[in-house]
Image (spheres, rainbow, N blue to C red):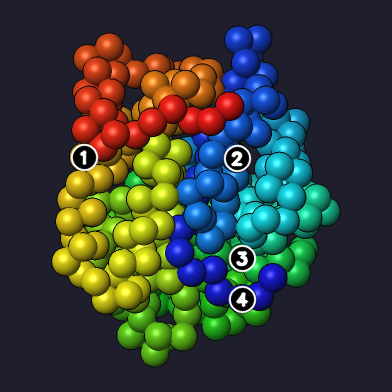
């Protein structure tokens, strides 16, 4: 797959059973629900998917289930976030073997990484597989902050690194990516609260877990902006903004799983040390969804 993905990149949670492992039935229901939301792609094993809390076996199980369930209906992106290059390369190869279409790679740091170290990390992954790579910058969760200049350099110098996901929440960085690349590098917004501005600024897509709870509303927002109908896009954005903010500030696995349960799709509790949503916050989320007339998820 070499074409640019344009639209919503939807992120599922990873459901757990009462016994603690991955709940396959719930996993497939979560994925099918996202496929109904008109995504341009589905990205498994990102932050919402609790990838940092999965064993190696569980990560492989989730990646395989994702590819199998989507079954070619939309591109599948698999997230790779590892401290070591060797572990990241192993996951990239596995994603390729099971038929994923793209990798989303974020470097994770304990010791502060130099740009040379980050570059070599991406270069090793790019050498290990011919899958297209989305370079993912999210300093708030990874401990690594890549500048627009460096991200553009990755795309220019590593042939399979073709896309950029920017989740710092700084719109100026997206403007910089656009300017530095003369608009030739597709970039994606990963910050819910600035989705309207980012799409209007030329983002090729919006990476979000919101479709789990908001169905095709994120896709409609993207389509309205692309059509130049900014007034209707703005109205829709501010209508869904309370949920967009809530799920991020409350932690994606915690809030999205709570919302799915409210919609009749139990996906288990988030894995400790993460905790389920407290009662007062659960009531608030229920009120937001009721105001939007969000209905039950089909069985």
Determine the secondary structure under disc 3.
Answer: strand
Q: CA distance from mark 4 to mark 2?
A: 23 Å
Q: Residues within 10 Å of mark 3 (few under 14, many from 20)?
A: many
113 on left or right of 123: left
Pointer 1 residue:
242
* Residue toward you, 122 or 63: 63
- Position of residue 78 relative to residue 232, above or below, is above
Q: CA distance from mark 3 to mark 1?
A: 32 Å
- Asked if labels 2 and 4 touch by Cβ distance under 8 angstroms, the answer is no
Q: Which mark is residue 3?
A: 4
Mark 3 or 1: the one toward you: 1
x, y percent for residue 4: 55, 74
Sequence-first disc among 2 and 3 = 2
Q: CA distance from mark 2 to mark 1?
A: 25 Å
Q: Residues within 10 Å of mark 4 (few under 14, many from 20)?
A: few
x, y percent for residue 33: 54, 39
- Position of residue 288 relative to residue 239, above or below, is above
1 on left or right of 227: right
Determine the secondary structure under disc 2.
Answer: helix
Mark 2 or 3: the one toward you: 2
Q: Quadrant of the C terminus?
A: top right
């Amino acid at each position: 797959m070499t074409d640019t993905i344009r639209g919503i990149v939807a992120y599922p949670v990873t459901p757990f059973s009462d016994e603690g492992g991955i709940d396959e039935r719930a996993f497939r229901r979560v994925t099918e629900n996202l496929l109904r939301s008109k995504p341009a792609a589905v990205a498994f094993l990102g932050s919402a998917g609790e990838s940092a809390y999965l064993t190696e076996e569980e990560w492989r199980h989730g990646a395989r289930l994702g590819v199998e369930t989507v079954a070619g209906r939309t591109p599948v992106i698999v997230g790779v976030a590892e401290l070591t290059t060797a572990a990241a390369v192993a996951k990239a190869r596995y994603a390729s073997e099971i038929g994923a279409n793209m990798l989303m790679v974020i470097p994770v740091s304990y010791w502060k990484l130099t740009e040379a170290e980050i570059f070599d990390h991406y270069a090793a992954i790019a050498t290990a597989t011919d899958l297209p790579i989305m370079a993912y910058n999210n300093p708030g969760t990874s401990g690594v902050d890549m500048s627009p200049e460096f991200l553009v350099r990755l795309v220019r110098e590593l042939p399979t690194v073709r896309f950029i996901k920017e989740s710092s929440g700084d719109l100026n960085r997206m403007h910089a990516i656009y300017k530095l690349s003369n608009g030739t590098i597709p970039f994606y917004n990963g910050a819910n609260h600035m989705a309207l501005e980012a799409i209007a600024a030329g983002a090729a897509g919006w990476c979000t877990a919101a479709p789990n709870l908001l169905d095709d509303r994120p896709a409609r927002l993207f389509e309205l902006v692309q059509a130049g109908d900014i007034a209707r896009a703005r109205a829709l954005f501010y209508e869904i903004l309370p949920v967009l903010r809530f799920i991020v500030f409350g932690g994606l696995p915690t809030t999205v799983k709570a919302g799915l349960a409210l919609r009749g799709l139990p996906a288990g509790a988030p894995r400790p040390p993460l905790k389920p949503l407290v009662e007062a916050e659960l009531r608030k989320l229920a009120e937001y969804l009721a105001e939007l007339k969000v209905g039950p998820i089909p069985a």
